[in-house]
């Protein structure tokens, strides 16, 4: 894209200034349209060092309302803490809310291309990063985001002249770093890597715009015009459903929930003895996981009153409290609803060496949100594939992902509901919503069977916990966690 880039004809000075003013005014008006249509806008500025991204950005936002946009600078080198999370996380936590703009002064391109040229990423690792970025941008666009990507292009001699001017002034010399000088020195190598990256991530849903940056006003006009055109298209497409995509991941065979026997039991003495032994083993493994910096995600879903809370309590009783966190997932808060539905889970992922336990999860999209009409049919149908992609990102980053479905039958649920309602100390556990959901048991069961069948991947399989006998379910969960952690630590195949 850079090698065969053909420059457009630059307007004369007077026309250029007039058109910039017109496009700035149009963008200010479009900002209101974006706010009213609740379109989140993500604008990414990439390019050569000293290409003028900052100066153009200042002119782009000149007439915009600062209450509804933010500018964020993403450094090419992730911090030590950021390195302890999956690659995409530090970028995704920054995505804008619906109706707002977020301008990125560099994004994932800078990190990936820098690490590729410095030998940190081999060919396979680079390809994996490209797949992650394309997946992420596609998910954002499918959910209604406008993603605008600009690469500011200048020639080698022009870059050298700009760097020299910055270095000659003590007030601007700080803006030039070793990476900028290295980039100019290795311009041809960088050109090849940048060109390949742009081609690899140029998709119709989130295309690259190459900006001729030799003249700042001309670069500003190009960016303004493209952003305004992008907004027109995004608002026009607002009501159009995104395409559904085929699953590309290997799935394990599943049986319908109704066919799973629930007669498994464990007597109390055996339960107490094994619980003690498993706690000791889990505690030992937790320290090893921490030492080896392995992140662990334990996800719980299940019927109301199935015993998730008690199960979580027993699993975490074997963990060091300094190294785990339990996330009870309720209805999303307004700032969470205003972003991609997976955002609130990306923000809760554990650091390497830590454990995150989710009491309800991202699977709400294909259960309660599906059945209660909190999302469209297109959105929940897309979610199966999006969730598989999300979990694959975690696993590829070295995360142990353990998913539990806590299963009971309808009669057991009724008995537990009744006990809760009639026991003062337990009444806080039962709500009218629980009773309403119970009336939709058959609909929920069909949705859950769909969920397990379509997301029971080989890399993040479901484990069904037969929980009519809570003792049995708790021990089974702890055995599975121990087995998975031992496997992650290399103690079993």
Image (cartoon, grey):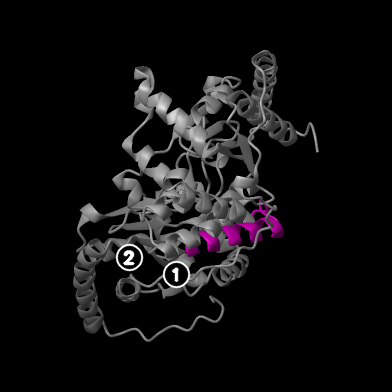
Q: Which residues are magenta?
A: 118-138
Left or right of 85 in this view: 232: left
* Lower sequence index among marks 1 and 2: 2
Q: Which residue is mark 2?
A: 56
Left or right of 123 in this view: 19: left
Q: Which residue is mark 1?
A: 242
Q: List x then y, in percent, for residue 49.
A: 47, 60
Residue displayed at 60% across by 53% down: 455
Report whether residue 319 is seen.
yes
The kind of secondary structure element at disc 1 is loop
Residue displayed at 18% across by 71% down: 25
Q: Closer to the camera, 245 or 392?
A: 245
Q: Closer to the camera, 368 or 20?
A: 368
Q: Closer to the camera, 439 or 9?
A: 439
Relative to 61, residue 353 above or below: above
Quadrant placement of the C terminus: top right
- Location of residue 432 (image quadrant): top left
Instruction: Using the image, tell me which numbered label, if any, was put on residue 421.
Output: none
Residue displayed at 42% across by 75% down: 212
- Location of residue 347 (image quadrant): top left
Instruction: Give how far apart the Cα atoms at labels 1 and 2 are.
Output: 32 Å
Report whether residue 218 is seen.
no
Q: List x then y, in percent, for residue 196.
A: 60, 70
Q: List x then y, in percent, for residue 441.
A: 46, 46
Tell me the crowding category of disc 1: few under 14, some 14 to 19, or many 20 or more residues within 10 angstroms, Cα based. some
């Amino acid at each position: 894209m850079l090698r065969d880039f053909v420059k457009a004809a630059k307007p004369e000075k007077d026309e250029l200034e007039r058109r910039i003013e017109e496009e700035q005014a149009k963008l200010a008006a479009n900002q209101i349209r974006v706010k009213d249509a609740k379109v989140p806008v993500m604008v990414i500025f990439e390019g050569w060092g000293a290409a003028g991204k900052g100066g153009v950005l200042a002119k782009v936002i000149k007439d915009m309302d600062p209450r509804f946009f933010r500018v964020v600078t993403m450094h090419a080198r992730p911090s030590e803490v950021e390195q302890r999370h999956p690659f995409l996380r530090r970028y995704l936590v920054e995505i804008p809310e619906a109706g707002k703009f977020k301008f990125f002064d560099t994004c994932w391109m800078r990190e990936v291309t820098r690490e590729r040229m410095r030998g940190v990423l081999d060919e396979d690792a680079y390809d994996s990063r490209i797949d992650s970025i394309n997946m992420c941008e596609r998910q954002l666009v499918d959910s209604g985001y406008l993603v605008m990507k600009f690469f500011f292009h200048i020639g080698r001699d022009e870059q050298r002249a700009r760097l020299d001017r910055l270095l000659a002034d003590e007030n601007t010399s700080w803006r030039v770093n070793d990476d900028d000088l290295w980039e100019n020195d290795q311009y041809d190598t960088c050109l090849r890597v940048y060109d390949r990256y742009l081609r690899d991530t140029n998709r119709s849903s989130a295309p690259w715009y190459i900006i001729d940056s030799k003249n700042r006003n001309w670069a500003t006009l190009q960016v303004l015009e493209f952003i305004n055109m992008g907004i027109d298209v995004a608002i026009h497409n607002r009501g159009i459903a995104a395409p559904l995509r085929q699953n590309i991941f290997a799935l394990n065979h599943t049986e319908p929930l109704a066919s799973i026997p629930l007669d498994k039991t464990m007597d109390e003495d055996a339960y107490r003895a094994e619980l003690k032994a498993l706690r000791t083993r889990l505690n030992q493994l937790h320290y090893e996981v921490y030492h080896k910096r392995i992140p662990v995600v334990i996800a719980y879903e299940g019927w109301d009153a199935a015993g998730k809370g008690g199960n979580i309590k027993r699993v975490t009783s074997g963990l060091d409290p300094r190294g785990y966190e339990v996330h009870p997932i309720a209805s999303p808060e307004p700032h969470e609803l205003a972003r991609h539905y997976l955002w609130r889970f990306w923000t809760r992922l554990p650091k390497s060496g830590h454990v995150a336990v989710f009491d309800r999860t991202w699977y709400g999209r294909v259960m309660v949100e599906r059945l209660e009409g909190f999302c469209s049919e297109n959105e929940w149908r897309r979610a199966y594939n999006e969730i598989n992609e999300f979990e694959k990102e975690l696993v590829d980053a070295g995360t142990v992902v353990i998913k539990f479905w806590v299963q009971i039958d309808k009669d057991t649920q009724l008995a537990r509901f009744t006990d809760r309602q009639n026991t003062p100390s337990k009444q806080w556990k039962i709500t009218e919503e629980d009773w309403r959901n119970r009336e939709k048991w058959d609909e929920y069961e069909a949705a859950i069977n769909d969920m397990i069948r379509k997301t029971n991947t080989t890399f993040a399989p479901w484990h069904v916990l037969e929980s009519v006998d809570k003792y049995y379910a708790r021990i089974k969960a702890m055995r599975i966690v121990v087995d998975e952690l031992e496997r992650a630590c290399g103690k079993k195949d």
